[in-house]
Image (spheres, rainbow, N blue to C red):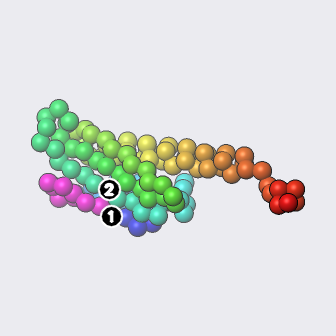
């Protein structure tokens, strides 16, 4: 999995990078081979209503892209929430793909005539 981490209006702290690396490892364990590219963007916002930080995860999966965004005051906390949500969305995506493949009836000789 290719990982890209970017900070907007701030520098990425070592603790945040460690949290991202741990969450990436967890994604690889639970969804091996599904995510090809993951971009993590952390932005310090000027708005007091948004809590100060915004985290956006963009995961490139075959034939799709999954995007998760979270806002809050603690980067580590919203990173955890965002990765948890991403994991749930990937699990749902895999479930839907399994169901769609199960519904396709196999081709028979009558279909070919």
Residue 83: percent from left, percent from top:
40, 48
Question: From the image, which quarter does the N terminus lie in?
Answer: bottom left
Residue 11: % across, % down = 17, 58
Q: Do the residues bearing badges 2 and 1 touch, measured as CB atoms within 8 Å?
A: yes
Dot 2 alpha-carbon crowd within 10 angstroms: few under 14, some 14 to 19, many 20 or more: many
**73 vs 26: above or below:** above
The quadrant where residue 70 appears: top left
The reply, left or right, for residue 94 in relation to residue 83 is: right
* Mark 1 crowdedness (10 Å alpha carbons): few <14, some 14-19, many ≥20: few
Is residue 6 located in the magenta-colored stretch of the structure?
A: yes
Mark 2, secondary structure of its residue: strand
Instruction: Indicate the position of residue 24 as horizontal and vertical percent values.
Output: 42, 58
Q: Which mark is residue 72?
A: none
- In primary-sequence order, the first of circles 2 and 1 is 1
Q: Quadrant of the C terminus?
A: bottom right
| Residue 66: in magenta span | no
Residue drawn 47% across and 64% down?
Answer: 36
Write the residue at 49% across / 45% down: 89
Which residue is at the far top?
49
Q: Is residue 27 visible?
A: no
Whether residue 18 sits left or right of residue 36 in the image: it is left
Q: Is residue 2 visible?
A: yes
Q: Secondary structure at mark 1?
A: strand
The magenta span reads 4-12
Mark sitting on residue 40: 2
Q: Which mark is residue 4?
A: 1
Q: Nearer the viewer, residue 76 or 101?
A: 101
Residue at 34% from the left image edge and 59% from the top image edge: 39
Q: Residue furthest front?
A: 113
Q: Position of residue 23 (x, y in %)?
A: 41, 54
């Amino acid at each position: 999995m290719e990982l890209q981490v970017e900070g907007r209006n701030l520098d990425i702290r070592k603790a945040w990078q460690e949290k991202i690396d741990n969450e990436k490892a967890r994604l690889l364990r639970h969804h091996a081979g599904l995510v090809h590219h993951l971009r993590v963007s952390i932005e310090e916002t000027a708005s007091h209503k948004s809590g100060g930080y915004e985290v956006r995860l963009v995961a490139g999966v075959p034939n799709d892209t999954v995007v998760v965004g979270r806002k809050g005051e603690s980067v580590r906390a919203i990173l955890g929430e965002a990765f948890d949500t991403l994991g749930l969305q990937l699990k749902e995506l895999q479930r839907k793909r399994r169901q769609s493949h199960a519904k396709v009836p196999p081709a028979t000789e009558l279909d070919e005539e």
